[in-house]
Image (spheres, coloured by chain):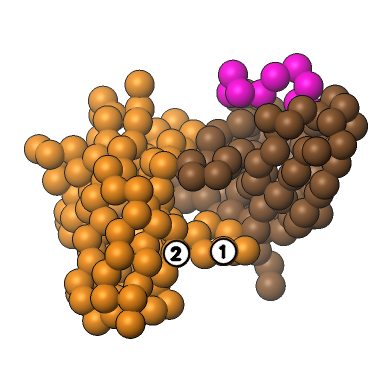
Amino acid sequence: AQSVTQPDIHITVSEGASLELRCNYSYGATPYLFWYVQSPGQGLQLLLKYFSGDTLVQGIKGFEAEFKRSQSSFNLRKPSVHWSDAAEYFCAVGDTGGFKTIFGAGTRLFVKA
Amino acid sequence: DTGVSQDPRHKITKRGQNVTFRCDPISEHNRLYWYRQTLGQGPEFLTYFQNEAQLEKSRLLSDRFSAERPKGSFSTLEIQRTEQGDSAMYLCASSLESGRGNEQFFGPGTRLTVL
């Protein structure tokens, strides 16, 4: 069965520091992978997605993620975090049938001054 | 703004009452999804429509839950005889039918509190 694991429930980084949020997935075929961000009172916003091709994908707000098939990982990175990045981040996998998206439990990011 | 909208944003009800939520998808999207999100968890898939046809329902969707999408436009999610365990954020999403996967656009959600 498809599943997504985000090992870190919460992470705290200093403003200006680099960030890496971990995501591991379980999926039999080539996965469609996503990272979403959810701010309080806001809907989920897509940061980036991977379907195929280049394993390093660029997203909005300066985020990037790298797909590593051998490790079943799709970690999210940002070189310099801003206070406005404080939010909950969800990794997700979509099946090739195109209707069901499985989300991880999320990682809450705290940014300290 | 032509994003996904949900109404109401918040609903407080007493146990045993019925509630109905509405979702208006992005106009050209023919797929519509409902998810439930509880505190500290990611969204969990509930059901999915392609146009007006409900094609998939999760085991999470008990007999007290019903969803409709008349005419393939807006959708409603009704919960009958609410229980305290139904307290959650109910998210709606929509997408275009696409062979390139399933990029879904989410609404702001309806937060349900059952007292």
Decide: marks 2, 1 in contact (CB < 8 A)?
yes
Using the rendered view, name the quadrant where residue B76 is placed.
top right
Label 1 residue SS: loop
Q: Amino acid at mark 1?
A: Pro
Which one is earlier in the sequence, the residue at label 2 or at label 1? 1
Q: Does residue B75 appear to the left or right of B88 in the view shown?
A: right
Examine the structure image and report whether residue B62 is included in the region drawn in magenta: yes
Q: Does residue B36 appear to the left or right of B7 in the view shown?
A: left
Q: Does residue A41 appear to the left or right of B41 in the view shown?
A: right
Marks 2 and 1 sit apart, C-alpha to C-alpha, by: 7 Å
Where does residue B54 sit, x and y in percent of width and height? Answer: 69, 28
Where does residue A102 sit, x and y in percent of width and height? Answer: 43, 36
Mark 1 packing: few (<14 Cα in 10 Å), some, or many (20+)? few
Q: Which mark identifies residue A13?
A: none
Residue A24 seen: yes
The residue under label 1 is A40
The residue under label 2 is A87
Chain given the colour orange: A
Where does residue A60 sit, x and y in percent of width and height? Answer: 37, 71
At a point 35% along the width and 21% down the height, the residue shown is A1
Where does residue B30 sit, x and y in percent of width and height? Answer: 65, 45
Tell me if residue A50 comes above or below residue B57 in the rendering. below
Q: Are marks 2 and 1 on the same chain?
A: yes
Q: Which residues are magenta?
A: B58-66
Tell me if residue B97 comes above or below residue A54 in the rendering. above
Q: Amino acid at mark 2?
A: Ala
Shade representing chain B = brown
Farthest left residue? A70
Q: Quadrant of the C terminus of chain A?
A: bottom left
Examine the structure image and report whether residue A75 is included in the region drawn in magenta: no
